[in-house]
Image: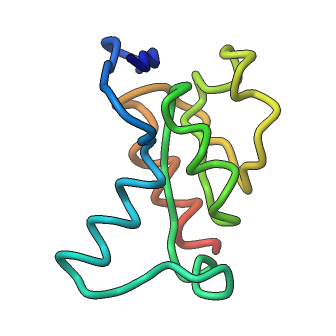
Amino acid sequence: MTAKVSSIHVNGWFGGYDKLAMTRTLLAEVVRRSISTRERERFVFVGDSPNDAPMFAFFPNAVGVANVARRSSIASRRRRRTSRGAKRAQDSSNSRILLAL
């Protein structure tokens, strides 16, 4: 079993899955679209916890919510920006970041 801490709970699952793998599966099966290395620049990902680490590593336009800096397991992962506020307070900060991209 794999377990990852989120900002509000612990996620647990069996199998070799992570958020990026399941995002690729969802896009392929539901939207009929794949995320190629070249196309990943067209997406923006916003995350705040260790279970988001694969997404931060893959998407060049990843935005970390401010509380991501407190988590050593993901603080060093590549993020283009980090919002100023944590959790719900980041909405306006993330909006400004998105407009700047």
Q: Nearer the viewer, residue 100 or 25?
A: 25
Q: Nearer the viewer, residue 53 or 86?
A: 53
Does 44 appear above or below 94?
Answer: below
Q: Nearer the viewer, residue 94 or 7?
A: 7
Residue 22 placement (x, y as % from top left): 35, 54
Does 40 appear above or below 54?
Answer: below
Q: How is the image coloured?
A: rainbow
Residue 46 placement (x, y as % from top left): 48, 49
Give residue 1's quadrant in the image: top left
Q: Judge left or right: residue 71 versus residue 18.
A: right
Q: Nearer the viewer, residue 17 or 71?
A: 17
Identified at 42% across, 45% down, the residue is 19
Identified at 42% across, 16% down, the residue is 3
The image shows a total of numbered marks equal to 0
Residue 5 placement (x, y as % from top left): 45, 15
- Residue found at the very far right of the displayed protein: 76
Does 59 appear above or below 66?
Answer: below
Does 93 appear above or below 89?
Answer: below
Identified at 65% across, 59% down, the residue is 58
- Residue found at the very far left of the displayed protein: 30
Q: Judge left or right: residue 3 versus residue 100.
A: left
Residue 8 placement (x, y as % from top left): 33, 14
Quarter of the image with the C terminus in it? bottom right
Q: Judge left or right: residue 34 versus residue 28.
A: right
Identified at 46% across, 59% down, the residue is 95
